[in-house]
Structures are given as C-alpha cells and as structure tokens.
Amino acid sequence: MNLHRIVSLSALSTVASTCVVFGCDPGANTPPQGAISTGNRGNSGSGSASGTGGTGSVLGNTGGIVIGTGGDENTGGIVACKAQEELAKLTPVNIVFMIDKSGSMGAQDVNGDGDYDDENEWDRTEVRWAPVRDALVAFFENPGAEGLGAALEFFPIGGQPTAPDTGVCRVGEYANPSVRLQSLDDPTKREQLVTRIQNTTPGGGTPTLPAVQGAIQYATELLVADPSSTSVIVLVTDGEPGVSRVVDGVYTNEKCFCYGTPGCTDEDEIPYVQQAVADAAMAGIPTYVIGMGEVDPGNLNMIAEAGGTESAYVVDIGDYETTKAQLAEALTSVQGVQAPCNLQIPAAPDGETFDKSKVNVEYVTGAGLTTQLYYAGTLVEGAPLTCPAAGPPPPPNPWFWTYDNDANPSQIVLCPSACNQMAGDAGGQVKVAYGCEIIPPPIL
C-alpha cells in the first residue's frame, strides 16, 4: 500500500517558520490584497490622503508576508495593513500506535502448513518482532519531522476473558495506553516509548476489535484536549482476530465481541473493526494498517479502506533488513499527515480578533517563484465549495486552500491538489497573511 494519503513534503521544517499577519485594516487605497512588501519601512506620508507612504518590510528569512505597512491612516499616504506578526505552526500530529504482540509475532510458519504447531516455528522473533521493534525505535529517535507526538500500546493486555469486554477483550485496557502521548521533539520523553517497546515480548491472542476501539477512544481524547491537533492510528498486526478459549479440554479461537457465546468461533470480527475505524474516519481520525507478512491482505485492506487510508501496507518477512526497511518506509509515509497541508491559526494578539474572511495564502518555491492559493469553501461567493480532485491527472488549477471548519476554523488546510504540486520542493515555503479580504479564485 502507498500510505501517502496526505502528501509528505520535504519542506516540512521550512514551513514551521511560516510568518503570518494580524490586524490589517484595508481601506479604499489599500495595495492589492496579498501583495508582498519589500525593502525598508518607509516614513509616514504627510498632508492629504494622496500623500505618499513608505514601503513595507520583509523581516529577514522568516518566510513572512507583511502586507504594505508603509503609510498611516491619519497622516496621509497609503492606508495599509498595520500588522503584528505571529508564527503559524504546523498542526500537532498525535500518532497512536497499537501494536500486535500476539504469540505469532514471534513465530514463523517454517513448513508452510498454515499454522505454528511445530516446536521449531516458535521463538523466531527475528522474523517479525525484531524488525517491528527496531523500526519503531529508529522512528521514535529520529522521526524526521517536527511537531509529532506518539502514544504506544500493545495487544493483548489483560487477563483471560470470561465474556465480551472482559480480560484482554476489555476496551478500557487499551483506551489508557501504557505510554501516553509523548513529544518526539523531546529526547527524554521519546525515551519512554523506546524503553516500553524494548521491554515488550510477544505472547497471547489477537483481540483486534477492543484494541482498535481503545486506540480510537484515546485518539478522540487527544482531539478533545487540543482541537487544533490531528490524531491518527497506526495498527500493526500479523493475523486474524481471535482469542483462545478452552472448554472441557477443547481449544477454540473466539472473537471478543461474542466471547463465550455459542457459535462464536465461526463469527467474523472484521466487519465490526471496519465499522469502528469508519466511524473514527468520519470524525477525522484515520487508521493506517501495516500487515506483517503471511496475512490475509484482503481483511487488512478492508480495515484500511474503512479507516480512510485506502489499503494496507503489507511488509515482506523472512529477511530482517528488508522487513525493517519496509516498515521504516511505511512509518515515514505516516509522517506525511503532518505535511504543511495543515497550519494552525495562532491566537490573535491582545486587542485584535481573527476574521476568517480576511486570510490569504501563498506558496513560494525554493527558487523564489510565488503562487497565489485560492480559497475553497462557503465563505466567498464564486469559490468552489470543496477542494478540487487531487488527481492524477492534476486539475487545471490545483492551487486551493480551505478551513478545517468554515463555521469555527482552527486550521488552514491546503488542498491535497496543492500539496501534490509542492511535494519534493525542499526550499518551498507557505506564507499566510491575515487581515485582508480573501482573494476570490479566477474564473476558469
């Protein structure tokens, strides 16, 4: 599977210094909306309103837009945006890792008979578990992007179930992860994640449904605590859902949602998992699925598609280095959810208010070429109501942005069509100016 659902730009770090402007008050003689001023700040004009104002200033290399700060309303000259600068930050991204540590994660079907019933097929952690552990440790220690946070839990945890939502089937076991959200920017905090996975060994069944439901509960909790953030779930698993049950010496493999009821062995848990991740995706929480070889890709693809990420990423097993490299590639792709497609709207300075109808966005390539991005949504007459289709092929005009919520925005979201165009531009910058009316899109 290609996990680049939200395009990862190599310009991640440059956008972290995006400069924005509040407090603009355009008048009849305001310069063109979205204009970028250059040079040193000029002196105020004198006399009538036809007086000449000085030019504005671009502040160093902060990637900022300052819209015409020359002139003064009371002394003549250009009536311009009197601006105070703030930094726009990338949307914080919370990655909730739910990792399968069932016994089969430390096994290999050596003889190819579809099970692990031979003694030499166990204690083979180098096949699945070791590359998962080491790829995650490498990711935690060097995430490759700023502003990422991670929480970590494994399944199964808990005791032997006696009914649905008990023991390892209890959702609450997974809704409070053993390592709650930690900033990967902080070496001491990410060390908690590293220590936890290094001290974990595989064993037990595969209670997928409650594990996923618990991860969704925690990801939702993070969104409630910080509505400007983004939460995603990464599910790593190697097998079909099932938890063992022994009755009168007979072993059965049952599902958590029906555990202990007649016929549970034959029930299918996948549709319940699909429904859970689909509901989460509707609430803005996508689920990425990574399968660890010798798995049914069909079921994992159904979970990923329902979770808003199209298909699962199934890595090959059998060679440690290959498996680890493929896992690293998958994890790097998940980083892309934090690409500068999502920018926080900073708090307005004292005495100022944010006006959602007065925002403009530009993209400046590493070569210095500037492209205006146009708004898509319900706030501007004549604007498209949604982002254009990203393609391929790309739309005639891919350069659009929108809000995460037109009624009460907390993020500026660059449309995927625009992010696709920016991919690979290591020197690219996104610039945002607040205070002048949104520039309407051209008539195509």
Image (cartoon, grey):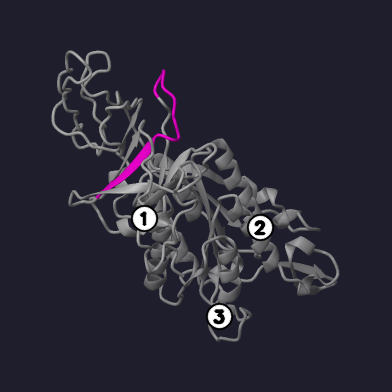
Against 301, is 69 above or below? Answer: above
Task: Pinpoint residue 83: horizontal percent, then vertical percent.
Answer: 30, 25
x and y percent of residue 361 in the render? 34, 43
- Which residue lies at the image location 40% right of the left edge and 40% below the top edge? 188
Density class for disc 3 (Cα within 10 Å; few <14, some 14-19, many ≥20) is some
Disc 2 versus disc 1: nearer the observer = 1
Residue 352, above or below 246:
above
Q: Which residue is mark 3?
A: 109
Disc 3 marks a residue whose amino acid type is Asp
Residue picked out by circle 2: 276
First-in-chain label (3 vs 2):
3
Up-down: is 121 above or below 38? below
Badge 2: few (under 14), some or many (20 or more) residues near its Cα, within 10 Å? Answer: some
C-beta proximity under 8 Å, tags 1 and 3: no
Would you say residue 350 sits in the magenta stretch?
yes
Sequence order check: which comes first, mark 1 or mark 3? Answer: 3
Looking at the image, tell me whether mark 2 or mark 1 is earlier in sequence order: 2
